[in-house]
Amino acid sequence: MISWKRILRSKGKLILECPNLLYSCELLLKNPSAASPSMQNLHLLRHTMAVFYGDPYSEDPLLCHKWGYTPDSLMSTLHEAGFVEIRQEPAQYKQKGPRDMRIVGVKP
């Protein structure tokens, strides 16, 4: 986060879209069968286990995450990095909401 802040201009926006770990965990607890990597569960798989380990059916081998965030933890991370006007907005790309989240912060 600090590197992005360093290269942004003053009042520049940092817009992050990534999976919402909290939503994926809640969905997995409601549907334990979503942990099974089968084509029959593809929709559930992409909303649960793929958030943790990547999508085994994706053509992109680099489509995986190194860390997971909840909306609160990502907003807190931006705050600690010195961003202001931090807010959550509806996700616009990939899986959109509720699986994905969009967090925006502004460089002071």
Image: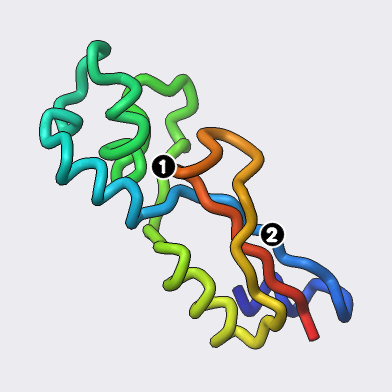
Kindly state the secondary structure of the residue where label 2 is placed.
Answer: strand
Kindly state the secondary structure of the residue where label 1 is placed.
Answer: loop
**Quarter of the figure with residue 7:** bottom right
The residue carrying mark 2 is 15
Query: At 35% across and 35% down in the image, what residue appears?
Result: 47
Query: Against 94, is 43 above or below?
Result: above
Dot 1 or dot 2: first in sequence order is 2
Q: Amino acid at mark 2?
A: Ile
Q: Position of residue 74 (x, y in %)?
A: 49, 69
Closer to the eye: label 1 or 2: 2
**Quarter of the figure with residue 5:** bottom right
The residue carrying mark 1 is 64
Left or right of 19 on screen, residue 23? left
Q: Amino acid at mark 1?
A: Cys
Query: At 80% across and 86% down in the image, what residue appears?
Result: 108
Query: At 65% across and 41% down in the image, what residue appears?
Result: 92
Q: Position of residue 25 (x, y in %)?
A: 25, 50
Q: Position of residue 6 (x, y in %)?
A: 75, 79
